[in-house]
Amino acid sequence: MRRALFLDRDGVINADHGYVHRITDVHFMEGIFELCREAVRLGYVLIIVTNQSGIGRGFYSEQDFQNLTSWMRQRFITEDAPLLAVYHCPYHPQGNVIYRKFAHWRKPAPGMILQAASDHGLDLAQSVLVGDGERDIQAAHAAGVGAAIRFADPAITPSAADVILSSHAEIAAWLRRHNAKA
Ligand SMILES: [Mg+2]
């Protein structure tokens, strides 16, 4: 069975400017590609799990999201860190009619992670998630992901995460140590 590095998108892969849906608004976080290459080298597959309530709220369309995602996947290929899959949840309880429901996919629910595990035969206990929000951590724990890393300042951010780290370089170093132990 394969193991995954699950990545939240906004705030982890790209800076979270709020409802990012245009390519020109994507600013990749410092160290994200180095982190992803390291994860691939250590044997993880890369999977994005992202809440996209902006679709349900009508701020942008499913097609806008797919266009940006295609472009982003291409960039990850160029960076030698191809993404295995991208899961997104367009639903939101205050969204437009067809999207107005509490989907079990929306983090903090574990639906996207569980679907990914089923689609790709993943060993969740051996997998790792990186998120910048507590909802990401809750989703990881609910799904049984082995380690949940909160990307935040540990001095000011209380979190149920297994570890709180404030740079992508530190996350890459943690992954290396984690695998040296295993
Ligand atoms: Mg985020």
Image (cartoon, helix red, strand yellow):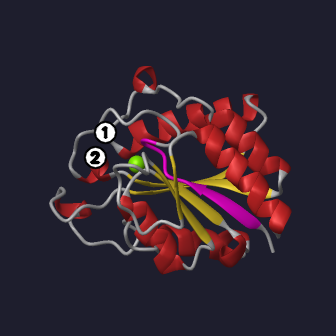
**Location of residue 56 in the rendering, given as x and y in whole percent from the top left corner:** 26, 53
**Location of residue 53 in the rendering, given as x and y in whole percent from the top left corner:** 29, 53
Residue at screen point 31% across, 39% down: 19
Q: For residue 137, which quarter of the picture?
A: bottom left
Amino acid at pointer 1? Tyr
Quadrant including the C terminus: bottom right
Write down the region rendered in magenta: 3-11
**Location of residue 176 in the rendering, given as x and y in whole percent from the top left corner:** 78, 53
Q: CA distance from mark 2 to mark 1?
A: 6 Å
Lateral position of residue 110 relative to residue 103, left or right: right
- SS of the residue under disc 1: loop
Quadrant including the N terminus: bottom right
Lateral position of residue 40 relative to residue 49, left or right: right
**Location of residue 11 in the rendering, given as x and y in whole percent from the top left corner:** 43, 41
Lateral position of residue 64 relative to residue 78, left or right: left
Q: Is residue 86 above or below residue 159?
A: above
Residue at screen point 76% across, 41% down: 37
Q: Mark 2 vs mark 1: which is more N-terminal?
A: 1
- In-front residue for pair 60/3: 3
- Check the image and name the residue furthest to the front: 155
Crowding at mark 2 (Cα within 10 Å: few <14, some 14-19, many 20+): many
Q: Is residue 150 above or below residue 118?
A: above
Which residue is the site of mark 1?
19
Asked if disc 2 and disc 1 are in contact, CB closer than 8 Å, the reply is yes
Residue at screen point 42% across, 33% down: 15
Which residue is the site of mark 2?
54
